[in-house]
Image: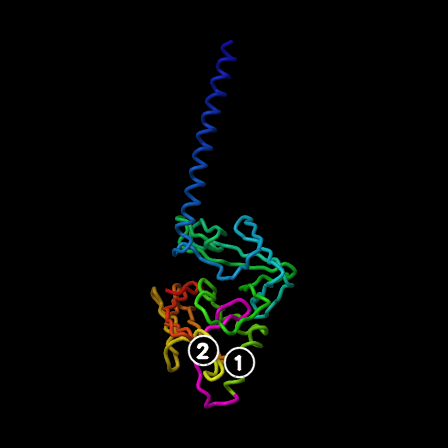
């Protein structure tokens, strides 16, 4: 009888402990979710800087996010030798997060973004290896490209919360073909007046020079001279100078800056102006 009573007490205590433990885990999960919402736009979040289209399927597996694109997009990767690799339309790939100083660098995806979230125990968190299904090589970087290009952007809403094209992909043949066609019009007449406008190239934002007399609809950057009204500032120690590609595309070189911002003022054809800022690759209008 005493053995039965003792067993019953132990079982009851185990149930109570289990419930308390589950409740604690539930509260921890809720806290983590709340932290993610609060930190998604903070310095603790490192976005992948890729315009994942609507309909992309995600699966978090350990320290990696696997994704499958809809049939409107494809993946372009750069390997360690600088060679480009292109997936089929609707391709599948993955991105891995790694904490190089400490521990706690987890991949996340929600309505606010997709990237690596740096926890309290990690002081340096980065996205590392990337891969494309069908290729054995690990990719130094990958981009999500759209089948469509819209060079003539005439409204702020078309670019707000869009990603700027990473400079490494200016050499991708699909991008170069589009930009070269624009630049050839400038080269044909060295005296032609140019202006800097924003355009959509394969799903990414770019700022590029175009002949002023052939484009009177695109959002333009107010200013003149070599910088065309665009400024680059490093918000931490370091520098990120403005640079210009031979195709007339401009970007801020952030190789020596962990928090670089491109900014300026853009104007619509009707005269409406808005300040813009591009930080962590994401473009926003104020």
The label on residue 99 is none
Look at 53% across and 66% down and name the residue there.
203
Q: Residue furthest top?
A: 1
How dense is the environment of label 2, judged by Cα within 10 Å: few (below 14), some, or many (20 and up)?
some
Instruction: Return the residue at label 2.
Output: 244
Task: Look at the numbered disc 1 and give the secondary structure of its residue.
Answer: helix
Task: Look at the numbered disc 2 and give the secondary structure of its residue.
Answer: strand
Look at 50% across and 90% down and name the residue there.
189
Please tell me which residue lies in front, 185 or 15. 185
Look at 54% across and 49% down and name the residue there.
60
Instruction: Using the image, determine if residue 46 lies above or below residue 190.
Output: above
Of circles 1 and 2, the one toward us is: 1
Q: Position of residue 80 (x, y in %)?
A: 56, 67
How dense is the environment of label 1, judged by Cα within 10 Å: few (below 14), some, or many (20 and up)?
some
Is residue 192 a member of the stretch shown in magenta? yes
Q: Earlier in the sequence, mark 1 or mark 2?
A: 1
Instruction: Using the image, determine if residue 264 lies above or below residue 193.
Output: above
Instruction: Return the residue at label 1.
Output: 182
Please tell me which residue lies in front, 41 or 284. 284
Please tell me which residue lies in front, 111 or 81. 111
- Dividing the picture into quarters, in which one does residue 44 lie? bottom left
Q: Position of residue 14 (x, y in %)?
A: 48, 24
Is residue 73 a member of the stretch shown in magenta? no
Q: Position of residue 202 (x, y in %)?
A: 55, 69
Q: CA distance from mark 1 to mark 2?
A: 15 Å
| Magenta span main SS | strand
Judged left or right of residue 35, residue 182 is: right
Q: Which residues are magenta?
A: 188-207
Instruction: Using the image, determine if residue 2 lies above or below residue 215.
Output: above
Q: Residue furthest front?
A: 270
Quadrant (top left/top right/bottom left/bottom right) for the C terminus: bottom left
Q: Position of residue 162 (x, y in %)?
A: 47, 64
């Amino acid at each position: 009888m005493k053995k039965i009573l003792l067993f019953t007490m132990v079982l009851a205590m185990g149930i109570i402990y289990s419930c308390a433990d589950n409740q604690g885990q539930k509260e921890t999960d809720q806290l983590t979710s709340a932290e993610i919402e609060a930190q998604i736009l903070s310095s603790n979040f490192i976005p992948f800087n890729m315009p994942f289209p609507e309909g992309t399927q995600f699966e978090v597996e350990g320290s990696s996010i696997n994704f499958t694109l809809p049939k409107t997009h494809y993946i372009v990767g750069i390997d360690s030798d600088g060679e480009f690799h292109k997936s089929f339309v609707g391709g599948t790939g993955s991105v891995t997060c790694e904490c190089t100083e400490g521990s706690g660098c987890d991949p996340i995806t929600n309505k606010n973004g997709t990237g690596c979230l740096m926890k309290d125990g990690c002081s340096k968190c980065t996205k590392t290896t990337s891969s494309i299904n069908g290729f054995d090589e690990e990719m130094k970087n990958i981009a999500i490209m759209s089948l469509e290009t819209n060079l003539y952007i005439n409204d702020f809403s078309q670019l707000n919360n869009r990603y700027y094209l990473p400079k490494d992909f200016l050499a991708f043949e699909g991008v170069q073909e589009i930009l070269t066609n624009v630049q050839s019009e400038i080269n044909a007449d060295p005296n032609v007046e140019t202006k800097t406008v924003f355009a959509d190239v394969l799903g990414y934002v770019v700022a590029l020079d175009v002949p002023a007399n052939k484009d009177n609809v695109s959002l333009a950057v107010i200013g003149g001279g070599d910088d065309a009204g665009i400024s680059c500032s490093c918000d931490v120690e370091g520098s990120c100078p403005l640079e210009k590609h031979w195709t007339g595309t401009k970007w801020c070189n952030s190789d020596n800056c962990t928090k670089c911002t491109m900014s300026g003022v853009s104007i619509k054809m009707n005269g409406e102006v808005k300040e813009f800022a591009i930080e962590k690759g994401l473009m926003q209008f104020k």
